[in-house]
Image (cartoon, grey):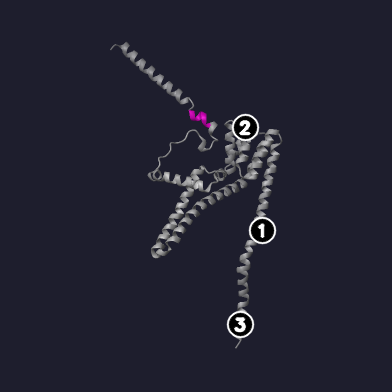
């Protein structure tokens, strides 16, 4: 092979290498799809994001008993009813589950109660077979109590979340009022508060901000928050913001007034709770401390009389 052929081959290899390096550098400098889309979907909840991880494979026990649990949940739903109320409470508790999944959990709680009671009933039935029928009735009652206990737990979750929202509301309202008074718009103020606050109300406002950024009008998103919320305070807050944005009224004054109202309501509730606790604290004083004090006061005298008396 001549020197010219070697030079041509080396030049072609060097040119091809430079071309590959150039294409790779251009590909690395190009922003990826996730980088371009993430600023627009970062406020969406995890369940609403378009890119989800691959679902995990169901275990053999879940695959085996899933149809039975689904059938039992459907039967329980037809028996109890109230799908609208359950769906409403699930939304107010911010639980990522459907009504059917909640019914499945109710069935599982009932089965746990039934299983524990059946184990104890079996031990008792082995000793006294005559109690078999009452023990079976007790097992059925345990199943019903397990189902009702899960529903009561859902109500308790709703109340706990609403208590945290009420505790968080005055601070969020004051921060929004300060941001608006500093010259920011409602959406910018929501963004500033949501990115710096952590809590239940800030999560609801993050959902409102996500709706706004996906094209929903600001007033419509706030009206949706007012409909979803089970607290009159949050409903008035969302409706007040919507009306202020629509009519151009001073938003900072509205937010300050609402925060003051919530603080005053919390102060009244604390005073009422203290009054109830004061009455409850009198019970051990009257029925426990006072009798013991009387006994300590009169017992030495009684003992002295017995010693003096012949």
The quarter of the image holding the N terminus is top left
- Against 11, residue 25 (above or below) is below
Q: Which residue is mark 2?
A: 217
- Against 191, residue 262 (above or below) is below
- The first of marks 3 and 2 along the sequence is 2
Range drawn in magenta:
33-38
In the image, what residue occupies the spot 41% across and 46% down?
Answer: 65
Crowd band around label 1 with a 10 angstrom C-alpha radius: few (<14), some (14–19), many (20+): few
From the top left corner, tell me how far across and down residue 152 is, in percent.
54, 51
Label tally = 3
Q: Horizontally, is 156 left or right of 18 in the view?
A: right
Q: Which residue is mark 1?
A: 275
Q: Secondary structure at mark 1?
A: helix
Residue closest to the eye, 102 or 42: 102
Task: Report, in whole angstroms, how far the alpha carbon at label 1 lies from the one at label 2.
Answer: 46 Å
In the image, what residue occupies the spot 44% across and 60% down?
Answer: 133
Residue closest to the eye, 132 or 175: 132
**Which mark is on residue 304?**
3
- Against 225, residue 76 (above or below) is below
Residue closest to the eye, 160 or 104: 104
Q: Secondary structure at mark 2?
A: loop
Q: Is residue 115 visible?
A: yes
The quarter of the image holding the C terminus is bottom right
């Amino acid at each position: 092979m001549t020197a010219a052929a070697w030079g041509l081959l080396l030049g072609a290899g060097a040119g091809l290498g430079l071309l590959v390096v150039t294409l790779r550098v251009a590909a690395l400098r190009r922003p990826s799809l996730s980088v371009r889309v993430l600023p627009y979907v970062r406020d969406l909840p995890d369940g609403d994001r378009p890119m989800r991880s691959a679902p995990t494979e169901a275990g053999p026990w879940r695959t085996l008993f899933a149809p039975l649990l689904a059938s039992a949940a459907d039967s329980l739903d037809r028996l109890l009813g109230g799908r609208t109320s359950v769906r409403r409470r699930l939304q107010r508790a911010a639980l990522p589950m459907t009504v059917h999944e909640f019914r499945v959990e109710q069935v599982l709680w009932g089965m746990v109660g039934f299983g524990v009671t059946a184990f104890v009933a079996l031990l008792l039935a082995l000793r006294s077979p005559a109690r078999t029928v009452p023990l079976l009735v007790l097992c059925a009652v345990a199943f019903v109590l397990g189902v009702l206990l899960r529903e009561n737990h859902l109500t308790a979750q709703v109340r706990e979340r609403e208590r945290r929202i009420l505790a968080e509301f005055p601070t969020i309202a004051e921060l929004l009022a300060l941001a608006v008074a500093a010259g920011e718009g409602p959406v910018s103020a929501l963004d500033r508060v949501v990115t710096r606050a952590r809590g239940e109300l800030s999560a609801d406002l993050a959902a409102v901000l996500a709706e706004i950024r996906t094209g929903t009008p600001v007033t419509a998103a706030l009206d949706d928050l007012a409909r979803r919320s089970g607290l009159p305070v949050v409903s008035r807050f969302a409706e007040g913001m919507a009306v202020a944005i629509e009519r151009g009224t001073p938003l900072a004054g509205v937010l300050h007034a609402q925060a003051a109202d919530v603080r005053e309501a919390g102060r009244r509730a604390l005073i009422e709770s203290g009054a109830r606790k004061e009455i409850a604290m009198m019970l051990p004083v009257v029925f426990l401390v006072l009798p013991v004090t009387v006994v300590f006061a009169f017992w030495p005298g009684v003992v002295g009389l017995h010693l003096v008396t012949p």
